[in-house]
Amino acid sequence: MIDRPKEQDKIDMVLWNLQSSVEEAIDRGLRTDTASSPNSKGKKPVGSSSRFGESVYVQQPYIAQTSMRPRPPHPRAITPPPPKPYVQRPVRQFTPLGMTLIRAFEKLKNAGLIVPLAPPPLPHHILPHFRSHEHYLYHQI
């Protein structure tokens, strides 16, 4: 069976925890003494006490600290800028060689002025640290 505190014990705990906040509010002048003064219709405000001399602490609304950064805005779809109008490039003028480009390439290569690039190495799928002789026949190919 769970022992739960009585209603009066709960109230006492809440008041005990709020005592320092209430004292600070009184020191700063944030308290309003509403228990002894009824409102314009003659009714006591909600939460007021019938005990003489008690006052109700009016809690100020929470104000976020200014040092906190605001949340970044949600990502929005950006419309692309309108396409730029097509501008035709100027026509390029080349000196006629009197031969095809393939023939010109062969002549430059034979003269040693240009060298073809070496072909890229074939891919080697076996890692350098893999000892294929210690594994399956499939890996020894």
Image (tube, rainbow, N blue to C red):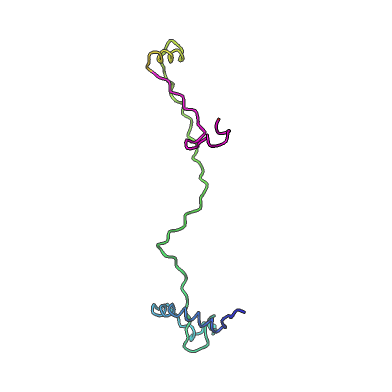
Q: Position of residue 80 (x, y in %)?
A: 50, 41
Magenta-colored segment: predominant secondary structure? loop
| Of 40 and 113, the residue lying toward us | 113
Residue 139: within the magenta?
Answer: yes
Q: Position of residue 27 (x, y in %)?
A: 38, 79
127 shown above or below 5: above
Point 46% across, 13% down: residue: 100
| Of 76 and 6, the residue lying toward us | 6
139 shown above or below 51: above
Q: Position of residue 89 (x, y in %)?
A: 44, 25
Point 53% across, 37% down: residue: 134
Identify the magenta region.
Answer: 114-140
Q: Quadrant of the N terminus?
A: bottom right
Residue farthest to the right, as pictured = 1
53 shown above or below 31: below
Point 51% across, 45% down: residue: 78
Point 47% across, 54% down: residue: 72
> Where on the picture, by quarter, is residue 25?
bottom left
Q: Is residue 19 left or right of residue 41?
A: left
| Of 121 and 39, the residue lying toward us | 121
